[in-house]
Amino acid sequence: MSGGAHRKLNPEELGAPRGYSNGVLARAGARLLFVAGQVGWNRDQAIVSDDFAAQFERALDNVLAVVREAGGAPEDLVRLTVYVTDRRLYEASLREIGAVWRLRLGRHYPAMTLIEVAGLLEARALVELEATAALPPGEE
């Protein structure tokens, strides 16, 4: 792991992943940050839109706000779990989600899992993002 970066693990026998990494080995001495599930709501805890991509964008921004508050950066994300209430909405929004992703994280892809669920605690939420970040060594 040169330059303090996390090492992406994508064994050839698993094929080339698209939009995620099969594994991420955190750099030595990293501090782990566990980010609670974030939905697409604003500071007043109001859902920003009924549009899936808009909710994903805001939920990702909320995750990144927690990471930054802890002294991290977007590339410190090592794991992301995406909970969706309708996988078809996610698939239909992939182009918009990809554009949002590239603006915020470029080509950084943590280990990711997508799970379709019957519902989320926030009734209007269509997506919830839960994350783990491995931050540089520093003060807690």
Image: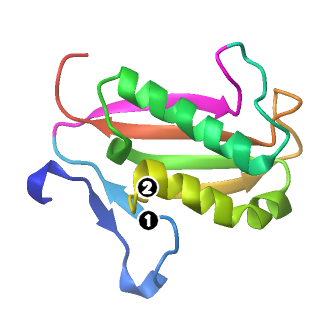
> For the point 84% across and 48% down, which residue is it?
85
Residue neighbourhood size for the residue with mark 2, other residues' Cα within 10 Å, grouped as few (<14), some (14–19), many (≥20): many
Position in image of residue 59 (x %, y %): 63, 36
Going by the numbered disc 1, the residue's amino acid type is Ser
Sequence-first disc among 1 and 2: 1
> For the point 89% across and 45% down, which residue is it?
118
- Above or below residue 140? Residue 24 is below
- Above or below residue 126? Residue 6 is below
Residue neighbourhood size for the residue with mark 1, other residues' Cα within 10 Å, grouped as few (<14), some (14–19), many (≥20): many
Q: Quadrant of the C terminus?
A: top left
> For the point 56% across and 59% down, which residue is it?
99
The answer to whether residue 32 is magenta is: yes
Which label belongs to residue 110?
A: 2
Left/right placement of residue 60 relative to residue 32 reads: right
Position in image of residue 4 (x %, y %): 14, 49
Going by the numbered disc 2, the residue's amino acid type is Pro
Q: Which residues are magenta?
A: 29-43
Determine the secondary structure under disc 1: loop
| Residue occupied by mark 1 | 21
The answer to whether residue 117 is magenta is: no
Position in image of residue 77 (x %, y %): 40, 44
Do residues under tags 1 and 2 come within 8 Å of each other at their CB atoms? yes
